[in-house]
Amino acid sequence: MAINSTPIFTKAPELGPVEIATANSSLTGSGTVGTAYTAGADGAFVHRVWFKALVTTTAGMLRIFVYDGAAYWLLHEEPIPAVTKSATVPAWEGVWECRLRLEASHSIRVSTEKAETFHVMAEAESLTS
């Protein structure tokens, strides 16, 4: 196997935001999914994914997939509790801490089980050689 003698560095952190709101109970990535982040030509490291509900939530699930250009791979399911937002109760929010290496052009895709609106943001660093 050939050894790459060119060092690979990371660029400045990047944020990939997406809004999702369409109900999708699939565990296979079929149906409606949002793209939170797509790696560049040299790949990327994803550090965390933030979730913030914009509405009152019912018990359900957010799902995070890696899409490799041909198939969806379920990585993580984030349980969502029932929260009635108000002037004194904030809407639900969460974060998934990870250290995920994405190959070139692979992407982080997300879906929500219920028809509730969420902002999802992936923090990542593109790689460059």
Image (spheres, rainbow, N blue to C red):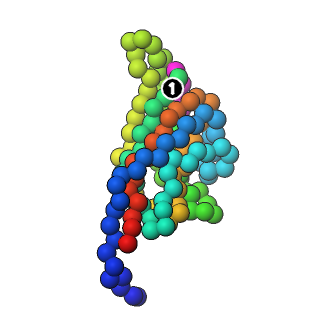
Q: Position of residue 92 (x, y in %)?
A: 44, 27
Q: Quadrant of the C terminus?
A: bottom left
Provide the major secondary structure of the magenta segment.
loop
In the picture, measured across the screen, residue 37 lies left or right of residue 115, that is left
Q: Nearer the viewer, residue 13 or 79?
A: 13
Q: Name the residue carrying label 1.
A: 54
Q: Which residues are magenta?
A: 56-61
The residue shown at (62%, 40%) is: 25
Residue 4 seen in this snapshot: yes
The residue shown at (64%, 39%) is: 24
The residue shown at (53%, 63%) is: 105
Q: How many marks?
A: 1
**Magenta span contains residue 59:** yes
**Magenta span contains residue 106:** no
Q: Position of residue 125 (x, y in %)?
A: 38, 56
Looking at the image, residue 22 lies above or below residue 55: below
Decide: few, some or many residues near mark 1? Use Cα within 10 Å; few <14, some 14-19, many ≥20. Answer: some
Q: Nearer the viewer, residue 86 or 125?
A: 125
Residue 98 seen in this snapshot: no
Considering every residue shown, the one lying at the far top of the view is 87
Q: Position of residue 50 (x, y in %)?
A: 42, 39
The amino acid pointed to by label 1 is Leu
